[in-house]
Amino acid sequence: MDILLFSLLTNFLYFCCGNIFVINKKTDFLSQFYTYFVGVATVAFVSLFLNFFTPLNQTINSAFYSIIVLIFAIFVIKKKFIFNKRHINFLIISSFITYLLIIYSTVNRPDAGLYHLPYTSLIQENKIIIGASNIHFRFGHVSILQYLSAINNNYLFLNNGISIPGASVVSFFYIYFFYDVWSAYKKKEKINFANFFSLFILIYISFKITGYGSFGNDAIGHLCFFYIISCVLKYDLKKINIEKLLLISVIAFINKPTLGLIFIIPIYTFILQNALSIKKLFFISFSFPTLLLYLWLSKNILISGCSIFPIKITCIEKLSWTNIEQITNVNIESNAWVKAWPDRINKNISVEEFTKNLNWVKSWSKFHLKYILNTIAPFFITLAIIIFYIKIKYKNLLSLNNKLRVEKNISINTLYLPLITSSFGCIFFFLFFSIYRYGYSYIVTFISLIAIIIVKNEISSKRYNLLFKFVSILCVSFFITKNIIKIYKNNSQTIWPNIYTLDINNKIFEKKKINHGNNFFYYLADKSDNLCMYSPSPCTTYPISKNIKYIEKYTYKILTHY
């Protein structure tokens, strides 16, 4: 039961933060969901900011948690906030979903052991280490999720707290898309493009994003992408809150930089609303979302010398900790790896030649493309069945009145921006980061929008209530069933995800403590699976280069490269 209790308390923290910092509070569910989203972003900002000056240890984290709850309690006492049934229901349901995602699950393999957990440990034991990517190159491209995890380790949750935030945030999105689908059925209002998009996304996440150990850092970024598309389809772009779009985009980006094309949406919307007004541009440049982005990019530069590691054009070579040799090698290897370099057909080709002139396409098609098609096939087939059902059942549903045609044309216009964004995303995905988990939200969104366009003439109807009810119940049943099966199969293992080892016998392998010089010690995972997991920091899976020198300045640890 501690998983359920800690999940509830974590969600309550996000709830408190959101309601403290959102000024214009509305009572409708979609506005309340955004309040939770702001709460998550606020905790992310605070944890990132604090780590510039202090480790995110249990004392600091507990103090932060206590302050937030105290401030919120004052809000309640002064009646600046009043609980209602929706608040309580959201907390209970989201906590139960978080519980189902976590219980008897594993951590993400092998990335959690390679750098998710080691980096979480690093920032809990140290304030920001300048040049930390020289310890392990993967520290250069961690996610904001590691900061959310680190600050959730307090005197109450202890180490288990770091496992909650990822599942917690994912649970919010489950509720959002389910509610959007269920309310369309329940209220019996005219179903629109946004409702259909939510229906398709609910189908996808119900069969694909169901295992805590499978989505790692990826899910939150992709769910943010789905969320922003839903907002664009739901609201008039000339009236939508630009800061909301920007905040969603920033959270997606700092979870998954490959989703950077998401910024097309807030940029276009800003231009549409303000025609490049200097005054508006000034205010948006210092809004909360942009401050979070600035802080993140600054952290990246201090960690690796690059604002986006390992993209060389974003690096500042003059910084003493910028390891251009490492950045170049990681860039080449990463580019080749995502294009199926380990599975290349021609074993004699060089890594540089492999990535040129589409030489990689044949190998990529044989392995990665096959995986993508197998993964997306159930979703594609399900959408095809729905389209076929709609076309057959409502083939005569074309006699719409003029008013409905106008409303429908307005809705069609809202499709263009998401369709263009996802189209560019699919192209960039194929050319630059063609592993499914790096860009599946582009693909799923594109397929969903094409499906909506195919049935656009039939969508403006009140007669899809049965379809929405059936699919939403089916999705929830599938999600719960899948997690019950997981619990039944894994009830012999630890109830919490094992953050200490991936060994089948739960053996924790001791890490070798090494003095790199000048009293800088690190730990080397050189036994068995060679994974650091959640262990004393800093930990790496390979020895630190002798070209890396350690100095300490103004109490900051700096790992320079010469």
Image: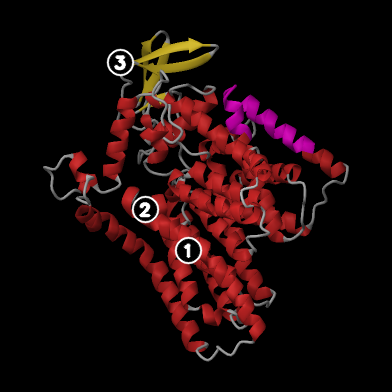
Residue assigned mark 3: 546
**Res. 100 image quadrant:** bottom right
Q: Nearer the viewer, residue 396 or 410?
A: 410
Q: Earlier in the sequence, mark 1 or mark 2?
A: 1
- Badge 1 vs badge 2, beta-carbon distance below 8 Å: no
Left or right, 317 with reference to 353: right
Span of residues in magenta: 46-71
Q: Nearer the viewer, mark 1 or mark 2?
A: 1
The picture places residue 110, in percent across and down from the top left corner, at 36, 41
The picture places residue 60, in percent across and down from the top left corner, at 64, 26
The picture places residue 225, in percent across and down from the top left corner, at 52, 54
Q: Earlier in the sequence, mark 3 or mark 1?
A: 1
Distance between the alpha carbons at the discs numbered 1 and 2: 15 Å
Q: Which mark is residue 429?
A: 2
Q: Nearer the viewer, mark 2 or mark 3?
A: 2
- As helix, strand or loop, the secondary structure at mark 2 comes to helix
Distance between the alpha carbons at the discs numbered 3 and 1: 49 Å
Compared with 443, 461 (above or below) is: below
Count of numbered badges drawn on the protein? 3
